[in-house]
Amino acid sequence: MNITHISAECYPLAKVGGLADVVGALPKYQNQLGHESMVIMPFYNTKFTQNNTFTEVFKSEIHLGYHTIDFQILALKDNALGFDVFCVHIPQLLYTAKVYSDDDSMRFLAFQVAALDWIKQKRDLPDIIHCHDHHTGLIPFMMTHSFVYDRLRSIPSVVTIHNAQYQGWAGMELAEFIPHFKADRLGFTMWGNSINTLASAIKCAWKVTTVSPSYMEELMYKANGLENLLRHEHHKCVGILNGIDTAVWNPKADDYLVKNYTIKNSLSGKKANKDYLCKTFNLDASKPLFTFIGRLVGEKAADLLPYMCDRALSYQDISILILGSGDSNVEHQLNSLKEKHSGRYNAFIGYDEKLSHIMYAGADFLLMPSRVEPCGLNQMYALRYGTVPVVNRIGGLKDTVSDFSLNGGFGITCNEASVDAFNNAIERGVSWYSHKEAFNKNTKYMMSIDHSWDKSAQDYINLYKTLK
Ligand code: ADP
């Protein structure tokens, strides 16, 4: 099967969050299953694009309303990623250091139009067009209703919702820039009184997927305004759990780590990484180390973190290390705890891929109090590196972590995102940690759990096959 993924992010070219990890892995695993899977994404001004070679494979112009804009399709040279990547280069709109800005509706419309313009003139058309999130949400609509894409009408389109909180709302004036379609089809681009590109994708795509089965169930009654639409379209909705790229996230071969390790020498391997973290961040390595890695936003319950940490450090003999950026208020609160709990708490405010890897390896526990978690990758990375995930039981967290008090359980789960619930969980963790033998046995067990993409990549292929 010939599969074209279209996405705003793809690791390692440009990453803001989990979307990049998924789009940077799924095509690789689909290729390993014998398919031809590739990615189309914008050409941003990132370290990766600066340091790698791209060649032009196509050049044309798009027409947005009365504007004509030149674009190129640049192919990443050498197939080192395990799949082909083609970037849409529109210097004045897409070539930015940051993936997202305050108003992206025109940028991503231009991206989608250029991608379809390139695809439509190819000799061999894809068998499947797989769109990711709202940034590519108008593609199923344009493929079905814009006259210029008649040739693409019979290609099945799939949209994966990685996060339904963000929907690509735009003023109705954006419609004037969408390639020509019959006026009575305008409603397919809308939800409420505005353009909503995620809603449009849900209406027009042949299949709608989300990144875990539980998140799909949750969306039917809590989808930031799209619940009724999703319930109406439920017959084409399915939840497929994300995998992780076990080649990138591999404690045995991870170049970022201070010491590599396998299940066999996990205790000494984790200790070396923990010692490094504790030395770097002035923490006591003899105490259980609780960590948090992620965007400091409400969905991740980052606003609770300062209170959670402050309370836990007042009652428990632990160390805490935070890595994240986002809400400036939360950043400030997290920074200001440093002085009060010096030697027991630290925070790195910013984005640091290397540090995140060392933290997954060196931590004893990873806190995920998320209020919304479509799949969550962090808990699966934590498991792979032998770190206990402490999670709120929602979305993908519910599908991947079971409490150690249950038969076969290996993590710590809470039933709500609250300071009380997580302090109780931290207390349970501290007590478990003191039973060294059981705790260490669990470390090895967690590392043996298989969350690789193999199964999920096949699930997507099976889904595509139902559409042919
Ligand atoms: P989301 O996409 O909602 O942010 P996911 O759990 O799906 O959440 O993916 C988060 C990804 O981003 C993980 O790979 C995580 O390690 C990474 N990440 C988040 N914040 C940071 C940070 N400040 N520094 C390094 N990596 C980060």
Image: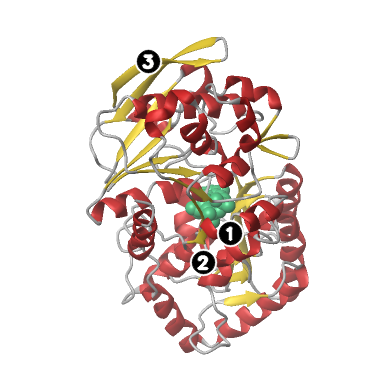
**Circle nearer the N terminus (2, 3):** 3
Which residue matches tag 1? Answer: 234
- Mark 2 residue CB less than 8 A from any atom of ligand 1: no
Q: On the image, which quarter does residue 223 sit in?
A: bottom right
Q: What is the C-alpha distance between the residues marked 1 and 2? A: 40 Å
- Mark 1 residue CB less than 8 A from any atom of ligand 1: no
Q: Nearer the viewer, residue 105 or 439?
A: 105
Q: Position of residue 85 (x, y in %)?
A: 33, 36
Q: Position of residue 300 (x, y in %)?
A: 66, 56
Residue 389 seen from this side:
no
Which residue matches tag 2? Answer: 363
**Circle nearer the N terminus (3, 1):** 3
Q: Depth-wise, is mark 2 or mark 3 nearer the camera?
A: 3
Which residue matches tag 3? Answer: 60
SS assignment at label 3 = strand
Q: Nearer the viewer, residue 418 or 453?
A: 453
